[in-house]
Image: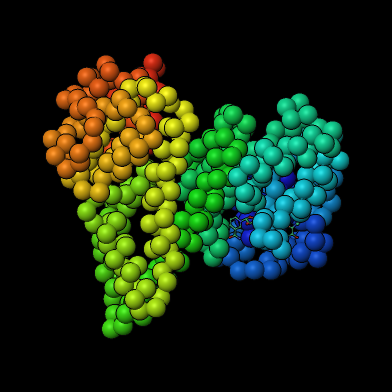
Amino acid sequence: MKIAVFGLGFVGLTTAVGFAKKGFEVFGYEIDENKAKALNELKIPFYEKDLDSALKDVLGVKLKITSDIKEALKNAKIIFYCIGTPMSDDGSADLSFLLTALKDTAANISLCDKAPILIIKSTVPPSSCKEVFIPHLQNLGLDAEKDFILANNPEFLREGFAYEDFMNPDRVVIGTYEAKNIRELELLYEPFTKDIFFTSLNTAEFIKYLSNTTLSLNISYANEMSMIAQVVGDIDIIKAFSILHKDKRFSGNPAGIVSYLYPGMGFGGYCLPKDTLALYKKAKDKNYEAQILNSILNVNEDILNFYVDKIQNEVSKDENIGILGLSFKAQSDDVRDSKSATLIKKLLELGFRNIYAYDPMANEIFKKTYDFNISYEDSLQNIKDKCKILVIATAWEEFSNVLNEKDKKIYNFRYMKGL
Ligand SMILES: NC(=O)c1ccc[n+]([C@@H]2O[C@H](COP(=O)([O-])OP(=O)(O)OC[C@H]3O[C@@H](n4cnc5c(N)ncnc54)[C@H](O)[C@@H]3O)[C@@H](O)[C@H]2O)c1
């Protein structure tokens, strides 16, 4: 399996050297002739720990670096694209360099091995492969199965640790058409890790942005909190953050914090809604508009409205709807500011008449706290018997049982995993 790597920057050079180090035959293709020449003289234009000695080991043995596209593509089965996707003037990702590289590949496809696998490793926004690259290649006269296979393989390496991260990846994600498992790509990554995840093309592209925006969110959030601390005054920011990091939810494998970094239908309960709002108000009193705190609260409303709209569009008002879970979270009977209550209130206001509810712990307290005209069931079986539509509103473990029910429409608003 000859591998060609297009673009020998941070990602491409690391990829080319990494596969060569594992014994694959690799051709690195760099359009910038001066860069290719320098690399052939073992001069890397950026610093990455251990990459220089690894390049020295493989150059001329398993890795060839060239500016000749024909030489790079000859007999190539796997082609990685590690080309820049910089920000355009309007802020969107500029895919033009990738489009050129794909066009140059298409013009030379007859040189490649039969139906080569073209793998986008550059970071590209979700839907780029499906909506931009495949149509682009088709417009160039290629057939999406007979002439090539397109895959997306986002790169998660950290600059500064590029080589180490590439050789020891914490996950390998490969997006393919209909999430099909491609044996050649498994063989490619098996020497690195067992954690190889095949997903749809859109999912793979999305995961890279999910990962990066989680990081940017944390940084901006920490910065907003530091600004709040400064306008309030007399707060030791360094100490506050180092004490935050002691929270046991940040450690462990998997760390407990991941259950908060998970979608659902919003947070409720006694603490998070009121405390987020109270800190937002305090900052405002001190003349600082805490945009992230405000957005946290807005998104918490949006998510529920989003799901209410979904039910309204898909379910008739006369249907029996079963709400599974009434407490604000599983393992608790606290129903204060429970999102199930907001959901039920909105559905009643919209004219849904036949709402049934069941919670393994909180039926009675919910009935006492909220004066809703709904029916309560005392077991999962009873509510299943009455309702074809079931909404998982609290992540109680017993509700994962319903996910396999074929004759029900399930709204899994807590993204529970089936058994
Ligand atoms: N730098 C990182 O830490 C990192 C990490 C993960 C993902 N990424 C993503 O990977 C992609 C590449 O990033 P990078 O930092 O390696 O970029 P880079 O600018 O360092 O390297 C890109 C290389 O591609 C070459 N090139 C451009 N057009 C070409 C073509 N048609 N044929 C052959 N070579 C061509 C350029 O000359 C350049 O050397 C980007 O989409 C980036 O967002 C970067």
| Camera sees residue 13 | no
Q: Is residue 247 above or below residue 171?
A: below
Q: In this view, does 112 lie above or below 249?
A: above
Q: Residue at x 82, y 36 (%)?
A: 139
Query: Going by the image, does 60 lie left or right of 373?
Result: right
x and y, in percent, of residue 96 in the image: 76, 53
Of residue 362 and residue 69, the one placed in the foreground of this image is: 362
x and y, in percent, of residue 116 in the image: 73, 34
Q: Which residue is drawn at 59% across and 39% down?
A: 202
Of residue 370 and residue 79, the one placed in the foreground of this image is: 370
Q: In which quarter of the image is the N terminus?
A: top right
x and y, in percent, of residue 142 in the image: 81, 32
Q: Quadrant of residue 329?
A: top left
Q: In which quarter of the image is residue 360?
A: top left
Q: Which residue is drawn at 28% across and 49% down?
A: 268
Q: Quadrant of the C terminus?
A: top left
Query: Going by the image, does 352 lie left or right of 16?
Result: left
